[in-house]
Amino acid sequence: MYLDLNPDLTPTQLSLKEEFHRFAANVIRPASVQLDKLADPEDVIRKGSALWDVFRKFHELEYHLALVSGNLGDVSLGGVEHHIIREEMGWGAADIAIGLDVSRSPFSLGLIIAMLGGNQRVMDDIVTPYMEDREGKYIGCWAITEPQHGSDCLAFGTEQFSDPSVGFDTAARRDGDDWIINGGKAAWVSNGTIATHAMVHFAIDRSRGMMASGIAIVPLDLPGVSRGKPLNKLGQRALNQGEIYFDDVRIPKEYVVVEPEAYGLLGELVLTGANSVMAPVFTGVARAAFEEAMTYCRQRVQGGKPLCEHQLVQRKLFDIFTKVESARQLSRAVTAYNSAAAPPQCRYAIMAKVYCTQVAFEVASDAVQLFGGYGLSKDFLVEKLFRDARAAMIEDGANDTLALVASRQMLGASI
């Protein structure tokens, strides 16, 4: 088990770390490596693939409850516990870790809305079936990006967010006791090709830009819903992504859980939560790349001695070690802070996401360099880690855009 610099981890937290490390090592990583080798992304989601075994096992062990309710059996989970879980899953594989985490997004939001406002229909129709699922039958996705909109969808608090020329293309209108949704979401919707439910962002009043938007929880078996093919990607190939289209999709009014007056606040909370997941997941990826490099440098002989005995290699390993530990300490501190803050601070979640994903890419790149030619071979895990890490700097907001959003928030508030 990798050294943890937090000396005050409780026996329960250490036990949780060991439990999820086993799950990551025995379930997540083998499945991700197997799925990564499939040339056709359709095969990743085909019935009987290893992906379904992972979802089934995740639900069977009731781990999905930990991410939604904050409880795992008798253990109440706080920020540090959530960080531990996500770091270990990211160490196993980023693509499956993200797929499992984003799967809970519409159900988590539904639970919050039901608890705050007593939306019993959402609770009965959507949240409870997910909570009771032990077979991985209910899978969620976050449908926000569109063909004409990417990270600008996440620019909460900026003047562009109220610009009427940049509203969502997907829109909904009220029709009696129902809402009708039309539009489409881009190919980057994680779990888009397999999800049963989507957390859909859409325009209600385009004259006010994205600020006058709403969020609905939409069952994806409704008439009028269709999907594109799974995206054929460089990395994170076990994370299926694909387009979703809405053609006069009718939903009951209770399924629209966020309307314009609350959209800015709830949308920012969603972004905060997403970035708070990415930071520990890619801390885990950075750690995995470091461990692969350490093992290889101890075993590989070059110039008559193991690589690790060359001073330049020792310095490179030290620099990598420093980056991994700094990413963990930052992301864990932010997760712990935001889990207790009311409201959580989006700019800190962005800071952790941007830093940790950048670290993961740099560490994976340095690990490839230490492997030399073998670092480019698909026979070694480090090649996959490098590809997986590259995608992270675009996921859940491109890092450059997110940094500008956080900077605007900093300028408008005391730090």
Image (cartoon, grey):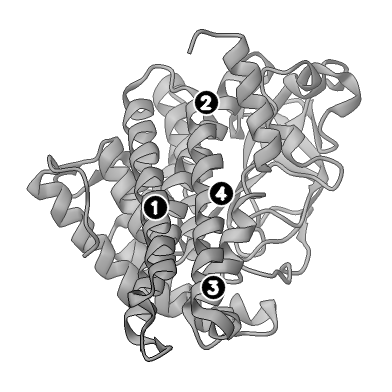
Residue receiving disc 3: 368
For label 3, the SS is helix
| Earlier sequence position, callout 2 versus callout 4 | 2
**CA distance separating discs 3 and 2:** 33 Å
Q: Mark 2 — residue?
A: 346
Q: Horizontal placement of 298 versus 319: left or right?
A: left
**Which residue occupies 61% across, 71% down?**
237
**Which is more toward the observer, 323 or 84?**
323
Q: Residues within 10 Å of mark 4 (few under 14, many from 20)?
A: many
Neighbour tally class for label 2: few under 14, some 14-19, many 20 plus, Cα within 10 Å: many
Residue 324 has which mark?
A: 1
Label 1's element? Answer: helix
Residue 153, placed above or below residue 207:
below
For discs 2 and 4, the disc positioned in front in the rendered view: 4
Q: Which mark is residue 358?
A: 4
Q: How many marks?
A: 4
Name the amino acid, label 2: Cys
Residue 227, horizontal then vertical, whole percent: 76, 61
Residue plotted at (59% across, 53% down) = 392
Mark 4 belongs to which amino acid?
Gln
Residue 136 placement (x, y as % from top left): 43, 64
Looking at the image, tell me whether mark 2 or mark 1 is earlier in sequence order. Answer: 1
Q: Is residue 147 visible?
A: yes
The furthest residue to the right: 165
Q: Position of residue 341 (x, y in %)?
A: 36, 20
**Which of labels 2 and 1 is toward the front?**
1
Count neighbours of disc 3 (C-alpha within 10 A) and say few if under 14, some if 14 to 19, many if 20 or more: many
- What amino acid is labelled 3 in the image? Val
For marks 1 and 4, give the CA distance: 11 Å
Residue at left 33%, top 33%?
333
Between the C-alphas of marks 3 and 4, the distance is 15 Å
Nearer-N-terminus badge (1/4) = 1
